Amino acid sequence: MDRKELQPLKRTEPAALPEKVLQFGGGNFLRAFTDWMIDIFNKETDFAGSVVIVKPTERGDYQEIDDQDGLFHVVLDGIVDGEQQSSIHLVESVRRTIHPYRDWKSFLASAHIDTMRFVISNTTEAGIAFSDQDDKDDQPPAEFPGKLTLWLYERFQHFGGAADKGCLIFPCELIEDNGTMLRDVILEYIEHWNLGDDFISWILNHNYFYDTLVDRIVSGYPEDRAADIERKTGYKDPLMVAGEHYHSWIMSGDERVRKEFPFESTFLNIRLVDSLSDYRELKVRVLNGAHTSLVPVGHLAGKRTVDQAMSDDSIRRFVEGFLSQEVKPTLDFIPESEVDQFISDVVDRFLNPVLAHQLLDISLNSFAKFGTRLLPTLKDYVEKKNSLPDRLLYSLACLIVFYKGEWNGKEIPLRDDVANLEFAAKMWQAHDAGDISTEELVDQWLDRLGVTEFDSVVRQEIVDRVSSHVSDILKKGIQLG
């Protein structure tokens, strides 16, 4: 089929399933993960529910989602039972979007929908936060938990505090105890805004916040393969999103989840556990830690995707050494065989040639990601081994150089909190002007990244090691041996 003959992706009839899921965020990950799962619920079980996507930030919109009536394809590739497999799945679970910055009334009105039962979010590690600058009359408050608090309050008032109108809430942010944290921040907003003890009681007794851990590599729009995929489907689809077959959603759930989320009737890898802590540490330190350590090393070495970087023997050895020699010793609370298997699985997933996971996409909010993904490994390694993890520190040096915002005459499009970008720019300007030394630059960076819980001797060793790496990188580029 010629691409000129492709049809726009539109529904042939209006979406009929009741709106059951309020989802904060409509980016690639949630669409290829939770929306895909809910579509499978709809097609393989009696779940029968659709998703309303809320734009959590002011910038941009989800017009493309509405233009396609919420439809998009998820393209999955990976190793399944020892063989490379591919699939194309039309996701039909999304019904509409709401932009609360442009239509606050519609956002609050969605709280009146009788069938709403689930709340899902993915607003990055920095997203679950309280701000005393948020006001209950803001339309909307800046922080995601503030928006959710007012939505839940609207629901509480509209339904008179009915017990069955509470929600099951699944934050997917990569934060330890994310459900517990979100609940506590919401309670803080309730106190701050004086919304009343009855509302607090309803939140605590009739809304259920679950700690969760999600895992799937999602690479985004498959630029190189889009034309072939569209010819196969017969539709134009700029919202097409590619990812790996592998997926995992672990949650500290209860029988209520099992009853209302019919995952056991599907092939989906969703598990209920009593405690997430061990699973989270394994995933964060190995998978996410490898991603965050790889990004600046790979980009400065001229690679642009994960598989390109891992196909370079020196970079692959660097990542494998980082995982097996620096991360693994900090995971002695998990059986060694499980750690080894997970490391092997992660390397295989990184080598998947189809995903083309962009390093720059992973680089989003690297300041926060260093704190959650690499800093715990650094602390525990020093404590357990009484030495420094040199690969981790080399990656940190690469991160500092990466945030210079320029490499080999080309701009690096940095994406982070404005204050972090301003800090990085200020430090590098001072360094390049000769106002501060490389050691002073690194020392300031360590403070900014939270590398503060070391005695003075270890701290100076870290400064010296990272400063040496930064100087070498600036002079010679990436040299991994």
Image (cartoon, rainbow, N blue to C red):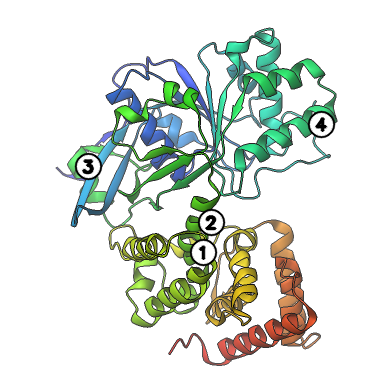
- Residue type at the position of mark 2: Glu
Nearer to us of marks 4 and 1 is 1
Residue contact between numbered discs 2 and 1, judged by CB atoms under 8 Å: yes
Q: Could you say which is closer to the camera, residue 291 or residue 178?
A: 178
Helix, strand or loop at mark 4? loop
Give the number of the mark in front: 3 or 2. 2
Residue named by callout 2: 281
Taking the view exactly as shown, the residue that stands out farthest to the left is 1
Badge 1 vs badge 3, beta-carbon distance below 8 Å: no
Which numbered mark, 3 or 4, is in the foreground of this view? 4
Residue 79 position (above or below residue 194) = below
Horizontal side, residue 347 vs residue 4: left or right: right
| For residue 164, above or below residue 99 | above
> Where's residue 128, x and y in %?
67, 42
- Amino acid at pointer 3: Lys
Identity, as a three-letter code, of the amino acid under mark 4:
Asp
Find residue 4 and name its label: 3
Q: Quadrant of residue 269?
A: top left
